[in-house]
Image (spheres, helix red, strand yellow):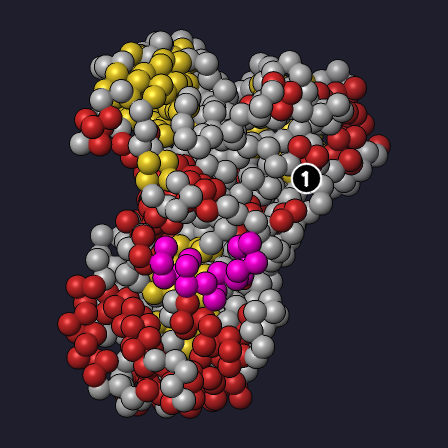
Amino acid sequence: MYKEFDKRVDEILAKLTLKQKIGQLNQIQQPLNVEQAELVKKWIKEGLVGSIIQAGTSTAGNDGQDGVRVDEFNEFQRIAVEESDSGIPLIFGRDVIHGHHTVMPIPLAGAAAFNPEITEKAYRCVAKEAAADNIHWTFSPMMDICTDPRWGRMVEGVGEDPYLASRVAEATIKGFQGDDLSDENSLAACAKHYLGYGFSEGGRDYHRTEISDYTLYNKVLPPFRASVAAGVATVMSSFNDINGQPVTSSKKYLTDILRGKLGFEGFVVTDWATVSRLVNQGVCENVRDSAKAAINAGVDMDMVSKTFMNELESLVLSGEVSEDIIDEAVRRVLRIKIAKGLFERPYCAEREIDMQEHIAVSREFAAESMVLLKNNGVLPLKNEGTVALAGPMLRAKRELLGTWVLDGKADIAPSFLEAFSSVAGENIKIITDKGSTVLDDSLAPFYNSDVIVLALGESHEVTGEARSVADISISKSQVELAKWAKSLGKKTVGVLFCGRPLALSEIEPYLDGILCAWHCGTETATAAAEILFGDRVPCGKTPVTFPRCTGQIPIYYNSTVAITGVCSYYGQAAERSYCDMLGTPLYPFGFGLSYTKFNISAISCNKTEIPLADIKNGESFVFSVDVANVGEFDGKETVQLYIHDKISSIMRPVRELKGFKKVLIKKGETANIEFNIGKTHLGFYGNNGEYLLEKGEFDIFVGGNCLTNNKITVKVI
Ligand code: GLC
């Protein structure tokens, strides 16, 4: 894919000095003051810089960031192109994670849409806005499989399932990179964090991970494999170690697997200063050793630690690092700079972007992402009568954008109070609390309401990098508020603005309806209000399991069975996984209600058995179901297909998502949904990363979530 540029790379490489080559492997942080800016310009002119990251701090996702400085970066580029000896353009990177000025749903919410089409469309809008601000490269998508919602960064990922994560990663990369990476509206994407960061022990950020190769190949790697196949331009090496081996100094992970097995041809950038931090991890005595370890492992670009800049030249001159290794790293960086079109168009031209279109896409994406978790008939709301609004998130605005928002315009994001008021019809009377977050006499008028809607959840500031929590329960004060509202004998609805699956067991009994609205960006509140009034029909599905309590973590759907029923799949057996808590989750993976009702027929298939040799030659089972909309609303259903490999050489999960289709079905109508399931679905990876296809029986499940018992059994003979 990117090797096609090697002829041109050879021509450039042949003219570079060692110092200039090493310059291409050095990414520096944007200058924070005039003195730093002068030093940066000097380095650029001397050919010591290949990239600048537009980030004011190492935790850009949480700290306020200065806006992008288009003109200043054009000046940096002018110096690189017109004043440095090599004339190689710089590549500018920024954390454009789930939006730029228009903010899209946090990636975890986006995954809940189960909709690659809207995902791609949304990230195309994001790329257009960011590229117009002189950004060439984004450090997104993040695809760290995670089953521990205590981890603050679950918010940035795509949940617990490798198949869903792979489809979302492909769509996001296609949105960012477009059909032509050199297009002025395209961004080079970055598959991160390679590898296994989502398995941080205890959900504690930056912590160690223990991942078997079997889990690595079957759960952690698939989204990266899909990203490489989708042409992702870059990959970011992660902070963590795997079983004591830091990824940033691992030839196994960065070269043998990423390049050898996955065939990645772009370049690897480290996460923030991870080269120099190999000393912190105790595998390198000093930064000179770190530079040597990282470059030999397969790191191409050093993010902001300046370890490559300071140490590599002497390592090559002393013969401790081969210049061939340097050349290959420079080759991979230059491939992407050429593919991005930076040599032909190094400067960012001023251009207007129509954000209105993007805001409309953000609203559509948000609505597709929201998950109706409970509804005992209270929703959709009648557009008449008196509605009481309260709750800690009722007037929130910045919080609804979510974490990792560097350039989002919070002022254009309505609060839930504003959006609800503008969406409600003239026959609705709205009463609100007086902004207190505790029960006080300002709530007295609520006695006169017909329904109480509570804006609940968590701030974006307890999600994201370095924002893990020890308890995922929704706060006690919010439980008390819901309990009080219910005590009035009113129908109560909870709208949950959150960045992770909160534990809702304590509040759930007091709510007649629960809409998980996540932190869905600019249009969170409007999309949620439109759903509450039935202007839009909810259609999101949970991309992660919702535990009943923190103590159940880790709990995920694609687990292997236990040897006895006590701890069986999701605790389905009568016995309990715990003495003090049910073993089942509060809401399972792939779950979400609609305002209408779908009946999914029994599964039919073209054949009940296929020889293994024919499967290996590309023959597939074809499964189909009829999905009837038997309710009162047109609606979308996400029909999911799971497999269970019943007898295999290594234990396989009792359910594995291997297909999903989201379809709009008008009320009273029926749709036929088909799935082709063949060798890429029925096999698995052994401990050495070899792909195994075995004979045997497979249970196939097709339904509206992972607990469906709509099953057919087929055989590979
Ligand atoms: C941060 C994050 C990474 C981000 C990078 C640049 O520490 O781990 O996701 O892209 O540094 O800000």
* Residue in the picture at 45% in, 51% down: 142
Q: Is residue 539 left or right of residue 33?
A: left
Figure quadrant of the N terminus: bottom left
- The amino acid pointed to by label 1 is Ile
The x and y percentages for residue 671 are 29, 16
Q: Is residue 296 visible?
A: yes
**Residue at left offset 35%, top offset 19%:** 697
Along the viewing direction, whichever of 229 and 115 lies nearer the viewer: 229
Q: Where, by quadrant of the figure, is residue 349 drawn? A: bottom left
Q: Tell me if the residue at label 1 has its CB under 8 Å from ligand 1.
A: no
Residue 520, position in %: x, y? 51, 42
Indicate the position of residue 256 as horizontal and vertical percent values. 36, 58
Q: Position of residue 587 (x, y in %)?
A: 58, 26
Residue range (magenta):
239-257
Which is nearer the eye, 488 or 515? Answer: 515
**Residue projecting furthest to the right:** 441
146 sits left or right of 663 in the view: right
Q: Is residue 534 visible?
A: no
Residue farthest to the front?
649
Q: Quadrant of the C terminus?
A: top left
In the picture, measured across the screen, residue 175 lies left or right of residue 157, that is: left
Mark 1 is surrounded, within 10 Å at the Cα level, by few (under 14), some (14 to 19) or many (20 or more) other residues, namely many
Whether 395 is among the magenta residues is no
User: Dot 1 corresponds to which residue?
Assistant: 472
Question: What residue appears at the point 47 percent right and 85 percent down from the top-left corner?
Answer: 310
- Residue name at image x 34 percent, y 21 percent: 696
Say which element carries label 1: loop
> Viewer-proximal residue, 595 or 430?
595
Q: Is residue 67 above or below residue 374?
A: below
